Amino acid sequence: MKVEYIIVGAGLAGLCFAQYCSKMGKSFIVFDNESRSSSKVAGGMFNPLVLKRFTSIWESQAQLDTANVFYPEIERLIDKKVYFKLPIYRKFASVEEQNNWFVACDQPLTAPYLNSKIYKERIPNIKSDFFYGEVFNTGFLNVKLFVESYQQLLSRQQKIKFEDFEYDKLNLSSDQISYKNLQAKHLIFAEGFSIEHNPFFNFLPLDGTKGELLYVKIPDLKLKEIIKSNVFIIPLDKDIYKVGATYNWQDKTDKPTNAAKNELIEGLEALIDCPYEIIEHVAGVRPTVKDRRPLVGAHYQHQNIYILNGLGTRGVLLGPYLADKLINNIENKVPLDKNIDVSRYYKKLQLIK
């Protein structure tokens, strides 16, 4: 069987790349063993700012523009609503944070996304002595539903195999990749934290950051927006909310912990003053890079093998944006931005000049 692309990994990154293959009429097959994907337990919130410090993110508007086209296309394909545009209300903890907000409202990179008027209306059952700042161009992706539904679509199309990818079964040449009964032009590794097992890219400084979330039922809350404080609360449906997230740089397992659960409960109870019920507690390891930039591009020796990884905590916006950049790099020879090009590490490690 001949295809143009083999894609290893069917989380957010791999599925975004698969969709761009479809849009460009490129044949492909996806492999995924469903063992370490963080996508199904992702918070899914997206925004163009770092809300802790009120600073902009790299290429924020370009990422938003891409996502606003990409996800509605996905919704039409899977016939499900997964992309929700909701305002984020950043709860202020002090007058100092209010002042920092006003400073950000005067900065050219952040001003387009911030409401310069403090939101002072009371939100029922939310505790806030210093009110809120409203962030524009924000919302959340139901990542779990997106991943499961798009995987089901690929399964119906016979374009996905739920099995281990066996690296030792690869045979490489300059113009062809052979894997078992497959022949392909290009191989994309989009494995998230499972890169640690990948013999072609496991030397890269991708260091997983564990995150944990709670799904809670809060009948009296009735939120219609996302609230961000020490934790975030995202309204889903039927009085269910997603509460997150924690950060752990030592534990690399997918097992939920009592310490993280207690941290989330403490944050939730500091934010709301009504009863709640914990429905589910989940954990996953985010693929994060030490310089907080993704890893995108070709292997330093094998120019038909590529990596698409390191989306970290901003995968909802980065996934479509980076997949688009990578496929245009491969098909149309469009150079990658130096901020995302994996070759920056080849140079640091003296693998290339």
Image: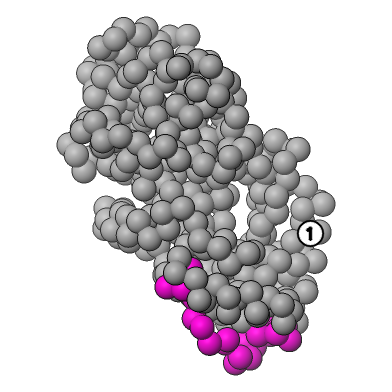
- Crowd rating for badge 1 (residues with CA inside 10 Å; few <14, some 14–19, many 20+): some
Residue 21 visible in the displayed image: yes
Which quarter of the figure is the C terminus placed in? top left
Q: Residue at x 43, y 48 (%)?
A: 318
Q: Residue at x 41, y 13 (%)?
A: 301
Residue 237 x/y as whole percent: 51, 71
Question: Which SS class for mark 1?
Answer: helix
Residue 29 x/y as whole percent: 31, 28
Q: Residue at x 45, y 27 (%)?
A: 343
Q: Name which residue type carries label 1.
A: Glu
- In this orientation, which residue lies closer to the viewer: 93 or 46? 93
Colour treatment of the image:
one colour
Taking the image as shown, residue 180 lies to the left or right of residue 40, namely left
Residue 79 visible in the displayed image: no
Residue 140 x/y as whole percent: 48, 63
Q: Which residue is tagged 1?
A: 263
Q: Residue furthest bottom?
A: 121
Q: Quadrant of residue 23?
A: top left
Taking the image as shown, residue 328 lies to the left or right of residue 121, namely left
The secondary structure that most of the magenta stretch takes on is loop
**Magenta extent:** 110-131
> Where 185 sits versus 233, above or below?
above
Q: Is residue 118 magenta?
A: yes
> Where 198 sits versus 227, above or below?
above
Which quarter of the figure is the N terminus placed in? top left
Residue 311 x/y as whole percent: 50, 43
Taking the image as shown, residue 59 lies to the left or right of residue 42, namely left
Q: Residue at x 79, y 59 (%)?
A: 263
Q: Is residue 196 magenta?
A: no
